[in-house]
Image (cartoon, rainbow, N blue to C red):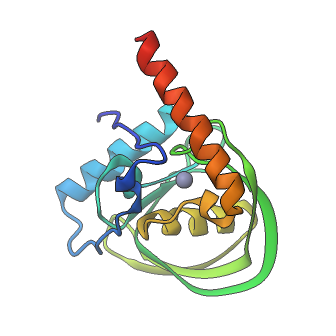
């Protein structure tokens, strides 16, 4: 397995739309394993292939503190959303920034697992938020897109300044 580079906002590659996976082959399984390792290394609870610059509809989530309950979602789709809920979100692609986002409270979703089985399930709470957040990534959307343009502009400036500082200290 390998740790992959995670793209950071405002990298335009985060805006690409991912294509559906047609067959779950070794390449997809290796990608999923590497995404999981990268997510654990970066202390995330979810990661989409778009964030590691692969335009395929693959999402990995693990909400457990022990890092022992990974979920692999291939071609995930929300079928139904109900209610609304605001939760504090962060993102491996927007390091150090957290803000409230409003999303559906309960969802019904469908995906294919690594064995190629099609699964339909319900989720609420953190899992529902996480799935919605990761599917947004596959569509080129970030959680900060839900913020006001002014807030987003300020954030972009702050992050660009940070990146510059990092380059200078290398
Ligand atoms: Zn994210």
Query: Does residue 107 appear left or right of residue 73 in this picture?
Result: right
Counting from the top left corner in percent of width and height, residue 132 is at 59, 69
Q: Is residue 46 in view from this perspective?
A: yes
Q: Quadrant of the N terminus?
A: top left
Up the image or down, 65 lies above or below 115; here it is above
Counting from the top left corner in percent of width and height, residue 130 is at 62, 61
Q: Quadrant of the C terminus?
A: top left
Query: Does residue 35 appear left or right of residue 24 in this picture?
Result: right
Counting from the top left corner in percent of width and height, residue 107 is at 66, 80
Counting from the top left corner in percent of width and height, residue 60 is at 46, 55
Q: Nearer the viewer, residue 130 or 150?
A: 150
Tell me what residue is drawn at x 55 percent, y 27 percent.
162
Up the image or down, 74 lies above or below 60; here it is below
When asked about the image quadrant of residue 24, the answer is: bottom left
Tell me what residue is drawn at x 29 percent, y 55 percent.
54
Looking at the image, which residue sits at the far top? 169
Tell me what residue is drawn at x 47 percent, y 25 percent.
164
Q: Nearer the viewer, residue 159 or 34?
A: 159
Up the image or down, 63 lies above or below 5; here it is below
Up the image or down, 19 lies above or below 41; here it is below
Query: Does residue 154 appear left or right of residue 34 in this picture?
Result: right
Query: Does residue 103 appear left or right of residue 71 in this picture?
Result: right
Tell me what residue is drawn at x 51 percent, y 68 percent.
136
Q: Is residue 44 in view from this perspective?
A: no
Q: Please count the marks in the image.
A: 0
When asked about the image quadrant of residue 112, the answer is: bottom left
């Amino acid at each position: 397995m390998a740790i992959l580079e995670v793209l950071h906002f405002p990298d335009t590659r985060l805006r690409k739309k991912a294509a559906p996976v047609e067959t779950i082959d070794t390449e997809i399984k290796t990608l999923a394993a590497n995404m999981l390792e990268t997510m654990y290394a970066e202390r995330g609870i979810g990661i989409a292939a778009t964030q590691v610059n692969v335009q395929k509809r693959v999402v990995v989530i693990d909400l457990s503190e022990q890092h022992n309950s990974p979920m692999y979602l291939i071609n995930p789709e929300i079928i139904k959303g109900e209610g609304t809920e605001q939760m504090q979100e962060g993102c491996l692609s927007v390091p150090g920034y957290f803000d409230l986002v409003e999303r559906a409270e309960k969802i019904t979703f469908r995906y294919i697992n690594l064995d190629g089985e099609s699964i339909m399930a319900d989720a609420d709470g953190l899992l529902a938020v996480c799935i919605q957040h990761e599917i947004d990534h596959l569509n080129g959307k970030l959680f900060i897109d839900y913020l006001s343009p002014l807030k987003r502009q300020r954030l972009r400036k702050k992050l660009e300044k940070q990146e510059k500082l990092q380059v200078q200290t290398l």
